[in-house]
Amino acid sequence: MNEAIYDKNNQPKNSSSFFQGNIAVIAVSSAVKGFGGALISAYVSLYFIELGGNPITLGLMTAMASIIGCAMSILGGFIADSYGRRTIVVLTAFYSVFFPLLYAVIQDWRLFAALSVVAAFGSISNPASHVLIIDSLSPEKRTTGIASLQVISSLPATVAPIIGGWLIQNYGLLDGFRLACIYAAATAFISAFIVFLFLKETLRSRPTANSNFSNTSKLRDAMKFPFPLSTSLKALMLSYALISFANGAVGPYYILYASSVIGLKPMEWALIVSLQSLGVALQVPGGWLSDKFGKRKIMVFSVLTCAPCTILFTLSRSFFQVLAVALLLVVTGIYYAPAYAALQADLTPRTIRGRITALWQLGSSLSAALGTLIGGFLFQTVNQASPFYLFTAAELIAAFFLISLVKEPAKKEA
């Protein structure tokens, strides 16, 4: 067996050291890659439909990618806890460079779907990336640190949708999207190079002589949880799975509804997405409130206020109405994710954090896949507004589990 030892050298001593070491590296690399990704992410659904796909095949593609991500997260959680975090993060960072380049040259929706599924194998690094962040933050300021990191890393992406929309407006949907893909590949390479040069390991492994990756019994034993999960942790992960289901049911279809029902143009949608991105700055005060008054309270507030927003979206019939609802979605929903990540860390011992993260991502990925499939089916065959009603119902059920079963621990895990 490997003897994994936590490296405390990368954990900050106080809040002023949030953006030193790994946190600074992750913030910069995520900002660079996020800018490129945001050039194309807002328009993937439109591009896929333009290539010949439909809402159901779009949902199937997204669901298949989520399912692949599930399997990869299980393996990735084992690797993160047993072999370290850094190497797998660096390798998958370079792996992700190739796919925007391939997206730029394909001309068939089937190939696009196949590449998207293959790209999902890069999800193997998600547990390691998540745990690297948790390892590098002190428990007392964990939510604030996560929120601050997300704000800094996402700020450059606030202008990217507008640039992507400008490319589509001037070069057409097909050529504009492909040009944006080339830029996205360049930023992905720069991001990968940054983590390769500067990212530090937070888990040192000392393998024994008979330790090897091909030992299947060792892999099976390592994936076992050495203690029963608490009711709070199980309910917390279940609530997140419901949130993922809700977001999956509507995520790919916002822009389709906005363009086909409301009649918005790509540049109008680009402005809305960019203004939404600015709302990420609210995560910092939200993180501070979570650390001060309780993560669970902030999560419940976020879910209950966000739930009806998608119904308001279906009632919108103009650019300004959609903009108002989109900003309301951000203002109400932005606090949930960092509070969740911090509360899960508070409830999880450090030595199995990678595997708990894998279990969490497994549940959320499967839920998102199911939500996307159901959302696409409802959008195409029942009613274009029905996925957005499903979102509200799933969010309310998630709030029920948070309120009735989740408790914050008296002592936080370091």
Image (tube, rainbow, N blue to C red):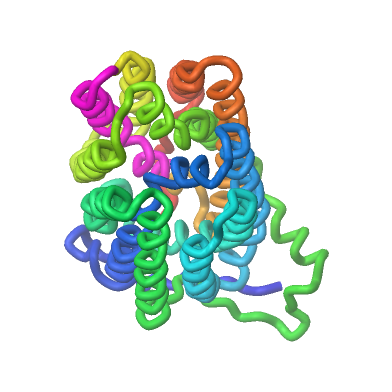
Q: Residue at x 50, y 57 (%)?
A: 350
Image position, residue 338 (x, y; %):
35, 44
Q: Residue furthest front?
A: 171
Q: Quadrant of the N terminus?
A: bottom right
Taking 33 as reference, is 65 left or right? right
Along the viewing direction, whichever of 189 and 335 lies nearer the viewer: 189
Q: Is residue 8 magenta?
A: no
Image position, residue 241 (x, y; %):
54, 34
Image height check: is 336 above or below 160?
A: above
Image height check: is 206 above or below 64?
A: below
Characterize the magenta stretch by its predominant secondary structure: helix
Along the viewing direction, whichever of 292 and 280 lies nearer the viewer: 280
Q: Residue at x 47, y 70 (%)?
A: 97
Q: Quadrant of the C terminus?
A: bottom left
Question: For residue 305, what is the image quadrant?
Answer: top left
Image position, residue 249 (x, y; %):
52, 29
Along the viewing direction, whichever of 257 and 37 lies nearer the viewer: 257
Question: For residue 112, what is the image quadrant?
Answer: bottom right
Taking 76 as reference, is 126 left or right? left
Magenta residues, start to end: 317-344
Q: Residue at x 74, y 78 (%)?
A: 212
Q: Is residue 337 magenta?
A: yes
Image position, residue 320 (x, y; %):
19, 25
Q: Residue at x 46, y 32 (%)?
A: 253
* Image mark count: 0
